[in-house]
Amino acid sequence: MKKTNFIFVLLLLTILSISCSSNSEDVPCTPTPCLNGGVSNADCGCDCPQGFTGSDCSTQLIPTKIFITKIKVTKFPNLKTNQNQWDSFVLAGYERPDIFPSLSFYNGNYLYAGQPINDSFSYGNDNFTFIPSTPIEINQVSSQYTISLWDDDTIGTSINQEFIGGYNFYIYANNGFPAVLNISTSNGLVAFELYLTYQW
């Protein structure tokens, strides 16, 4: 009798085991919608691009460094506010500004000043390009910076640089990682393009 009971219990456990395993078959998971260019993976999670994290790639990381590889001056006034020429040489054709951009911490030290492009004229859609010998490294990515445009009036050893226009800005603003940052002065007279790369 005990043997029969044992066999019955063993048979019952076997049936329950088979039944449970058949009910626990793998059910396909529901893919997570991935944001910011993330790609769904086999685990129904997201493989996030550089700079983003989280289960759906919705969290933006703060870069540890930003590099400025190129600065373009795309617009500037050809005359001063009083309508005089920037330069006042006797020879015609030498009255236009010798432009160069500078980048500095807001109310602080200079990080970069370009070599002047002589006798420049703006048509409003220009590409006066300045490429640093090494990319400008920005370590304090959340700080405020100043970009300015100057007319170089230096003659011999007499250094004279005339301010054309500038703008205070944040290079990182938690709005993605643009490859090109467009900056314009509040009056729209001076405009720049900053070409950026990022490190996390």
Image (tube, rainbow, N blue to C red):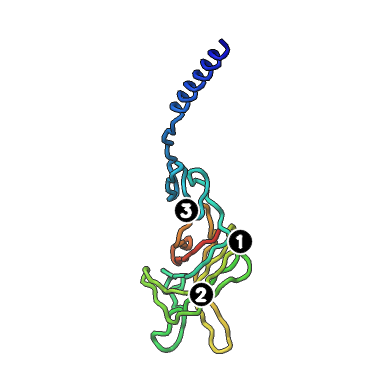
- Can residue 154 be seen here? The reply is yes
Determine the residue located farthest toward the right in the rendered image: 108
Residue at disc 3, secondary structure: loop
Q: Is residue 71 above or below residue 155?
A: above
Q: Earlier in the sequence, mark 3 or mark 2?
A: 3
* Residue type indicated by callout 2: Pro
> In the structure shown, which secondary structural element does the residue marked by tag 2 occupy?
loop
Mark in front: 3 vs 2: 3
* Residue 4, percent from left and from top: 53, 13
Report x, y in % for residue 178.
46, 58
Mark before the other along the chain sequence, 3 or 1: 3
Give above or below for 95 relative to 126: below
Q: Which quadrant is the N terminus positioned in? A: top right
* Residues packed near mark 3 inside 10 Å, few (<14), some (14 to 19) or many (20 plus): few
Q: Residue at the spot x=44%, y=49% of the render? A: 38
Which residue type carries mark 3? Pro
For label 1, the residue is 140
- Amino acid at circle 1: Gln
* Residue 49 disc label: 3
Q: Secondary structure at mark 1?
A: loop
Q: Label 2 belongs to which residue?
A: 132
Where residue 122 sits in the image (x, y, percent)? 39, 73
Mark 3 → mark 1, Cα distance in angstroms: 23 Å
Question: Residue, x 53% and y 57% (percent of image)?
Answer: 172
Camera-side mark, 3 or 1 = 3
Q: Tell me the distance, in whole angstroms, between the alpha carbons under discs 3 and 2.
A: 28 Å
